[in-house]
Image (spheres, rainbow, N blue to C red):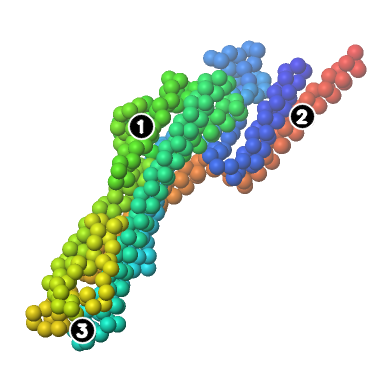
Amino acid sequence: MSDLLGIGYSGLKAYSRALSTIGDNIANAQTPGYARRRLDMMESVSGNDSVFYRGSVNPSGVEIRGVNRSVDAWLIEDSRLSGGDSERAATKLGWLGKVEGALSDESNGIKTGLTNLFTTADQLTADPANRTLRSQFLQSADDIASGFRTAASQLDKMSDGVEGAAASTVEDFNANLNALEQINIGLRKARPGSTNQASLLDERDRLLDKLSSQAGVSATFENNGSVTLRAAGSGDLLVGGGAVNPIAVTAAPDGRLSYSVGGSPLTIATGSLAGLSEAANHVADQRAGLDTMATSFAAQLNAAHQAGTDANGNPGAPLFTGTSAATLTASALAPEQVAAANASGSNGNMLALGTLRGAGDPEARWSGHLATQAQSTASARAQDAAAMTRADAAAAARDGVSEVDLDKEAAELLRFQQAYQAAARTIQVARETMQTLLSSI
């Protein structure tokens, strides 16, 4: 009877634990990073058996081997890699979209100002003495200069924004490194197969997911589940051996970003930090390109205007001053100072200004610059869509193994409830049989 009681008791203990495990699964079905758990059970070793030999028929109850997580290491790694690429593409696209907005005519009016300048010049060829048209010509020049200053200011703020986002992400990345080391400490102390160990492993994987989405990392695991983390590619140690090596970010004067660990340069090719680095490079290129265009347009239009004479017969004055987009300013000219005339007639210089329109004129070059930016944004959008599709597919494959299926848990709940009742019935039968035997003595 003691064997029967032992069998029933072991069943009650095991199935109670199994019901608790299923309850955890159901309660955490929507918890991010939670991997489905199952209780691993095996037949108990009877008194006549050993771990090396078991009799053919000798029931002896059930033993709990521990709690196992439903995970696939390869699917997890693939999900992290594709997730990092998706974060890089999405981060870059977000900033490129902002750059496109800053350069658009709705934001700065440069394209409209250039068009109005040439349109007014054409109108002045028919009526060069018209004071209103002369004022409109000067206003168009002021709109162009104001547009360049607006665009430069927006790109400057954008550069600061990228730098701030990178600093914040690096701070969060380093905090996650410290948290991962704390998880390592817990895993070294946790009992294998325990619920505590499973919870620590869930948190470890969640942190690794986050770190992978921020930067490229490579993880190796010990038997107890603790992890050694290195930077992907360079192999620089980030977490391991009880040490945590934080990374740092530095911004150059033009806004370009560089990363380092332990004072050594660190190349990051994936994750949001890589996307921020690429965005910073693009913004820096656009700032330099905007300055080049501003000074080029100013020099071209100044030369064209200075080639003529104003209403008082004086040589044309420069339309613009300044050495960059941020400092470009329209000269304070009176309507009479518009140089509409030249040696060929009172409207000769405006006629000559009109001939600037063509493949290399400021209007066409600015349109080409906007088209190039639009192409860059469209390319980033296509990359983001492709990376997101792959990341979603990898995440779905991973969830197919680790995700909690409530229908399956409900079936398992019913199965173990019945098993628990059977174990309880076994104890009851043993008790009734024992009482019968004792009463017959």
The residue lying toward the viewer, choosing from 181 and 17, is: 181
- As shown in the figure, which amino acid type bears the numbered disc 2? Ala
Query: Label 3 neighbourhood size at 10 Å, few (<14), some (14-19), many (20+)?
Result: many
Q: Position of residue 125 (x, y in %)?
A: 19, 84
Tell me, yes or no, if residue 209 can be seen here: no
- Which quarter of the rendered picture does the N terminus lie within? top right
Please tell me which of labels 2 and 3 falls first in the chain: 3
Residue type for callout 1: Ala
Q: Which mark is residue 100?
A: none
Q: What distance separates the C-alpha of mark 1 from that of mark 3?
A: 68 Å
- Tell me the residue that label 2 is attached to: 424
Contact between labelled residues 3 and 1, with CB atoms less than 8 Å apart: no
Give the answer, above or below, for where 243 lies relative to 152: above
Residue 323 % position (x, y): 23, 56
Q: Residue at x 43, y 20 (%)?
A: 241
Going by the picture, which residue comes out furthest to the bottom? 126
In the image, 139: left or right of 428?
left
Relative depth, front residue between 7 and 242? 242
> Which quadrant of the rendered structure holds the C terminus?
top right
x 26%, y 71%: residue: 333
In which quarter of the view is residue 362 placed?
Answer: bottom left
Residue 155, quarter of the rendered image:
bottom left
Q: Is residue 203 left or right of residue 437?
A: left
**Numbered disc 1: secondary structure:** strand
Residue under label 3, please give it. 128
In percent of width and height, residue 232 lies at 34, 34
Mark 1 — residue? 231
Identify the residue at image location x=20%, y=84%: 128
Q: Could you tell whether 29 is left or right of 277 in the image?
A: right
**Numbered disc 2: secondary structure:** helix
Identity of the residue furthest to the left in this view:
343
